[in-house]
């Protein structure tokens, strides 16, 4: 006989262990078909939107860099050509000179542009817009024009040489050296850097500086503890672009290339005068890789605000 059920008590039927195990074998939840279709449409849409960028990136970066890398190993030295930039004294010295000028250009440009950009953004006066336009005007100049301007300023017939000869009897000429190249790079880098700093300075909250002053912070501490940290992403981004430009710039160096031994000029010499295409390709690949690494590190430090490029 089966179990008796007392009057007024509802019988509870418990599922058998076999039924429970069968029920738990299925999925915990199921995605509606409509949601799945929508996700597929979004995926296809995203692929279509990224397809032009992928084609452009492959055509103008991946394929040329791969071809450049392969050509670099086809010379007499083979794949050892990539180590020549360290083992060969001429190549290594040109690399050090290139990186040294680029680092110094970046530091000086950031100092000048940082001070000028914050001042011009926060102090509006008659002629402010004209001054900003004059400071950013070199953006329209190619590297050859910048080099020619350096020659007119610090060349053999330049203004600095004429004035120094009149005052001291000695003509100061440095346009055809790394000092002249450094001057040209700084002049070329200030416009884009100052625009970046001005855009970042506009977003700084003045209340933070007022709070620091109310707590007794000196003007120096306000700059160090409030303004510079607030502008740090802009400094990193602009500094990375400035460094990359100084490393790979050719027009200015070509115009002043009397005594300048930087890597772009060495690559040009290997390619045109020595017809050493493999070595030129290897040096170009190494130069591009170094620049890309610096940009990638800067992008990470700035929180993804720098576009890494080769």
Image (spheres, grey):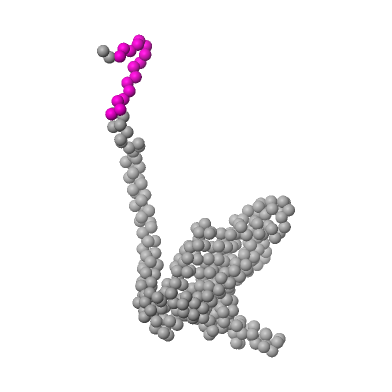
Q: Position of residue 261 (x, y in %)?
A: 51, 81
Image quarter of residue 118:
bottom right
Q: Position of residue 69 (x, y in %)?
A: 38, 72
Q: Residue furthest top?
A: 7
Q: Residue at x 41, y 76 (%)?
A: 81
Query: Viewer-proximal residue, 248 or 281?
Result: 281
Whether residue 206 can be seen here: yes
Q: How many marks?
A: 0
Q: Is residue 291 above or below residue 270?
A: above
* Rendered-image quadrant of the N terminus: top left
Whether residue 152 can be seen here: no
Main secondary structure along the magenta-highlighted residues: loop
Image quarter of residue 131:
bottom right
Q: Residue furthest bottom?
A: 169
Query: Viewer-proximal residue, 21 or 117?
Result: 21
Left or right of 11, for residue 179: right
**Is residue 187 found inside the magenta-colored segment of the image?**
no
**Is residue 4 found inside the magenta-colored segment of the image?**
yes
* Rendered-image quadrant of the C terminus: bottom left
Q: Which residues are magenta?
A: 3-18
Left or right of 2, for residue 45: right
Q: Residue at x 54, y 63 (%)?
A: 237
């Amino acid at each position: 006989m089966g179990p008796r059920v007392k009057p007024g008590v509802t019988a509870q039927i418990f599922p058998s262990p076999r039924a429970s195990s069968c029920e738990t074998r299925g999925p915990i939840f199921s995605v509606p078909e409509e949601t799945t279709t929508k996700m597929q449409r979004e995926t296809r849409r995203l692929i279509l939107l990224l397809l032009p960028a992928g084609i452009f990136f492959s055509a103008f970066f991946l394929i040329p860099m791969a071809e450049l890398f392969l050509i670099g190993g086809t010379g007499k030295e083979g794949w050892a050509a990539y180590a020549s930039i360290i083992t060969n004294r001429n190549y290594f010295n040109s690399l050090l000179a290139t990186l040294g000028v680029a680092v110094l250009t970046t530091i000086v440009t950031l100092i000048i542009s940082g001070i000028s950009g914050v001042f011009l953004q926060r102090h509006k006066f008659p002629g402010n817009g004209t001054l900003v336009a004059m400071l950013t005007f070199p953006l329209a100049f190619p590297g050859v024009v910048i080099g020619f301007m350096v020659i007119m300023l610090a060349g053999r017939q330049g203004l600095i040489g004429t004035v120094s000869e009149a005052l001291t009897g000695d003509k100061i000429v440095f346009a055809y050296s790394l000092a002249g190249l450094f001057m040209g790079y700084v002049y070329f880098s200030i416009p884009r850097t100052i625009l970046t700093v001005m855009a970042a300075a506009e977003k700084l909250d003045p209340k933070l500086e007022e709070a620091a002053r109310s707590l007794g912070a000196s003007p120096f501490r306000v700059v160090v503890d409030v303004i510079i940290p607030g502008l740090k992403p802009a400094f990193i981004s602009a500094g990375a672009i400035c460094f990359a430009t100084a490393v790979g710039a050719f027009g200015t160096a070509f115009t002043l290339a009397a005594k300048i031994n930087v890597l772009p000029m060495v690559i040009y010499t290997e390619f045109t005068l020595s017809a050493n295409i493999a070595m030129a390709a290897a040096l170009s690949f190494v130069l591009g890789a170094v620049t890309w690494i610096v940009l990638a590190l800067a992008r990470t430090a700035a929180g993804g605000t720098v576009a890494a490029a080769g």
